[in-house]
Amino acid sequence: MDKILRIKMGSKPEFSVEKLGDYAGLGGRALTSKVIFSEVPPLCHAIGPENKLVIAPGMMSGSSAAISGRLSVGCKSPLTGGIKESNAGGQAAQVLARLGYAAIILEGDSPEGKLYTLVINKEGVKIVDAGKLVGLGNYATVEKLIAQYGEKVAYMSIGSAGERKLAASSIAVTDMELRPTRHCGRGGVGAVMAAKGFKAIVLDDAGCSVRKPVEPEAFKAANKEFIAGIKKHAVSGQGLPAFGTNVLANVINEAGGFPVNNFSKGQYPNVHKISGETQAELETSRGGKATHGCHRGCVIQCSGTYVDKEGNYVTKQPEYETVWAHGPNCGIDDLDAIALMDRMDDDFGLDTIEMGATIAVAMEAGLCEFGDVQGAIKLLQEVGDGTSLGRILGSGAAVAAKAFGIERAPVVKGQAMPAYDPRAIQGIGVTYATTPQGADHTAGYAIATNILKVGGFVDPLKPQGQIELSRNLQIATAAIDATGMCLFIAFPILDQPETFQAYIDLINGFFGLKMTADDVVALGKNILTWERDFNKGAGFTKEHDRLPMYFKREKLSPHDALFTVTDEELDEVFNW
Amino acid sequence: MDKILRIKMGSKPEFSVEKLGDYAGLGGRALTSKVIFSEVPPLCHAIGPENKLVIAPGMMSGSSAAISGRLSVGCKSPLTGGIKESNAGGQAAQVLARLGYAAIILEGDSPEGKLYTLVINKEGVKIVDAGKLVGLGNYATVEKLIAQYGEKVAYMSIGSAGERKLAASSIAVTDMELRPTRHCGRGGVGAVMAAKGFKAIVLDDAGCSVRKPVEPEAFKAANKEFIAGIKKHAVSGQGLPAFGTNVLANVINEAGGFPVNNFSKGQYPNVHKISGETQAELETSRGGKATHGCHRGCVIQCSGTYVDKEGNYVTKQPEYETVWAHGPNCGIDDLDAIALMDRMDDDFGLDTIEMGATIAVAMEAGLCEFGDVQGAIKLLQEVGDGTSLGRILGSGAAVAAKAFGIERAPVVKGQAMPAYDPRAIQGIGVTYATTPQGADHTAGYAIATNILKVGGFVDPLKPQGQIELSRNLQIATAAIDATGMCLFIAFPILDQPETFQAYIDLINGFFGLKMTADDVVALGKNILTWERDFNKGAGFTKEHDRLPMYFKREKLSPHDALFTVTDEELDEVFNW
């Protein structure tokens, strides 16, 4: 994994393979953010030729390190106008890493808007006309790709939303069953892939082998300890495998931070109808799976398979954020409808969080009532159909609110907030406000400490301690996102010193390094600094590190909570 | 004119009349920008309750000073997110000034989105239910208002676009014929008026008198000299009265700076079909008027009346920017179609510049062909009908380009560029980039010196001298916009020292002051500083003082010109 594949689009598509050079030692988010910071003019247009799309497996991807299969995609975001790193599970990271590529960099723009398929295998690289894939959804695209390239391959693709260059469009990554269910979802990365002229990427590692550690014994021992640590923690070892991420529905609802009807209430009376517990039971009773991994090497298995009443596959187990977005945030308590919308999002190539938030904005604007299941599905179908209404919705919550003339768009830097109300859980509000990524829970998951009491406890309703909490989590997360490790390792790492040590030993064993915890922190800080410097060049200031004003004006039930962290405090997050 | 009428909307609409206090001595843009800077939190939502709408006649409005009837409207702009001052002619400024109000400030938000009519006369102030006006276009609104309040009244109103809170919505002001043809057009001010709960404002100055000068003799003499100066200058005394603002079509086309087909070419072969000369001849031959004023006291008479083949009124004489926006920028050379679209814009309450630019973006995105007259009219009708497509278009060129997934949106700070390509006329590019208002030709009309050779000559194709030119014009313009004088006085003022002196003497004679040219400059600088400070608080930086990157990448025919003023030079505009 010591080379970069650079694809230069333009009147004649070209590519080159280069050494890592200045980027040596970086992977995942560290590599995508460093490349975007170094090579992309911050004031370029996100779908113009000066932007680049960087696809990078994590530092540990392709190895036998547990749960190391996250793939990072980076670019200037069409949604936020700032830097974007969006990562997904699925098989692509492992395969790309085994092919030896630390990154694919897509540059320039598609000649006359044509779409291509990028095919990468041990023999080399081909750029072929996307032909009949054009216009297809992700499921049909992958089906056709499988017919041509087989089943021992990982695929990445965009759906119709990406082709239309919509700001809520995602890039799909196939899972172990070759379904396009894992998405680099946030920030409109699908639009950038389309602008570069790519409908699909075929990653075939036939003839390649697992990446070997420099110190096999140390690596093996650390991996064993690391896995044991993950399995013994209540969240990663029990809650997530049993009920998936949607185990959070009851928990966040109980805390009064479960946003209902476009963030107008903090608790949902019908939560039991859509909770992780209910969902797991339903899946199991119908012959689906409640415990499953999104890629080989996963030891948490927080995913699953959602099937309909007849036992037919519908979609992967919808994540907590998806269930919330298409469910309670739209006043909807119908798991089958939520699963259908998850399937539609995956097929059209859309971010489920952004779409749920946007449909709720549309509901508030009066396009249909909160709770109108068929209305919500119809709105989502408009996006798939590419109607004018669909183009509004597919551009995300901020644009939709502007077009519909309403104030209440729950966005930061143009990106919709996920499934945690920042008034009831102030720590996540600090992350929403300040992360360079736009409102994003994964960037500094304060829920861990505010609600789950992982890594200590900071009272979610009070401003005290939230800045330090979010800061430390943002730094740690950036570093984890560089390794290709699933973010859920944070739970055992935060609570169990021996698991944190095993994590470091694992990296050291693989690369033959002597890294310490301080080095991990330094890496996280470097990544955040590159991202913030890019954003500064794109015109972002501390004034962009704010929640919309109505989160300070409109009280959230049941706690009558307002977001009370001051602007001055927010400005301290990156003063480390 | 020593009081402010403050309307506080909320669950129970209230109003108060206060002294000018800290705002004493200010008028027009000076007053609107000072109030917005002082009273509006820059990070508020433009259509949220924290924003305010300030309506202020110029310092000289209501007096017998020539051509002093401009009305300024200020707020945080829904289109740009920055401060906005949008001014219009028509009768409202004179009437409001004679009523004694230096400003109306609309605050808070409408209870349950209800719409009201604000009625102001010598007896006092009433806030009455807008009733059957709701949903009507500006023409029908004014017709109903006339039936109720008579013909000796000035009206302000919003159309359907404002009611929908669209970011391209305007506020209409009636002209001498009580037609809603003069618009505070730019920046979405109509949406803010709707958010405050007002459909219409009735201004009745029955029983009030012309504002009296402190030094009548000096004032009278200066006014005479001032008028003589305006009449003897070739632009304000001959070109504008004879052919209206559209006298520029041939001139700008000749210079290669006439943007065609969404700013993709700099010259239009069919310019003779839509030029000011052709337009004036057509109007006259049909029984319309080619020389007419937009308000009493105008001594330039650059407007006119556009009638159809049967001699029936269609609209006021479309301005140069309107003819260009709905004409050549969309590949259209049909004056009757352009006049119809001008009428539709006025009726729906839309900015003609933003709408023409947006329709051109839609054409580039493939919604119809450039040159498709019926297609363009149909797109505009969608905005009036409030369809989803209409909501995209009514949100302006930047949102439309985002929704349609194209890069080429000719905008700065989210506001569309007017009828002068910044690659062929670099001075106006400096103004577009740097004015706090978003792309706006009136903010520093470098065309004067780059093309018309008024106030000297600076080569339009070279970067040299453009910074100083734009700086000086922006300062002078801000000061003129404070007086309520029409900006076209700049032509004689810039070229004729005696007319500039008469202008200052006129102000001094009216107020009994001893202002010098330096004081005028100081006022202009103060206004720009308030505006820039507000924008800074709203998150604007030097990175927002840039043209879109494609103006540096894509050459404009016939000069193969790129915008070549450097970023570093742009940053010097406000270093005075």
Image (cartoon, coloured by chain):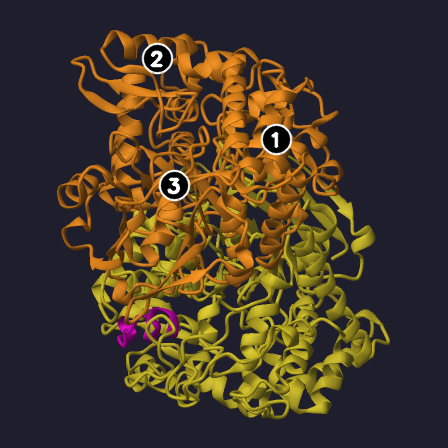
Chain colours: A yellow, B orange
Residue placed farthest to the right in the image? A514
Chain letter of disc 3 in the image: B
- In the rendered image of this protein, does residue A210 appear above or below residue B401? below
Residue B136 to residue A461: above or below:
above
In the rendered structure, find residue A279 and report the number of the disc placed on it: none
Main secondary structure of the magenta stretch:
helix
* Other residues around mark 3 within 10 Å, as few (<14) / some (14–19) / many (≥20): many
Residue A12 can be seen, yes or no: no
Which residue has dot 3 on it? B93
Q: If you read the primary sequence from the N terminus, does the residue marked by circle 1 or circle 3 appear first?
A: 3
Q: Amino acid at mark 3?
A: Ala
Q: Are marks 3 and 2 on the same chain?
A: yes
- Give the residues drawn in magenta, as a range: A324-336
- Residue depicted at x 68% and y 55%: A536
Q: Secondary structure at mark 1?
A: helix
Residue B443 rendering spot, x and y as whole percentages: 56, 36
Q: Which residue does the image show at 18% across and 45% down from the upper left?
A: B149
Cβ atoms under marks 3 and 2 closer than 8 Å: no
Q: Return the residue at label 2.
A: B279
Crowding near the residue tagged with mark 2, few <14, some 14–19, many ≥20 C-alpha atoms within 10 Å: many
Whole-angstrom CA distance, mark 1 to mark 3, is: 31 Å
Chain containing the residue with disc 1: B
Q: Position of residue A274 (x, y in %)?
A: 32, 80
- Locate residue A144, reporting x and y percent: 41, 47
Mark 1 lies on residue:
B429
The quadrant of the rendering that contains the C terminus of chain B is top right
Tell which circle, 3 or 2, labels the residue nearer the N-terminal end.
3
For residue B243, side relative to residue B527 (left or right): left
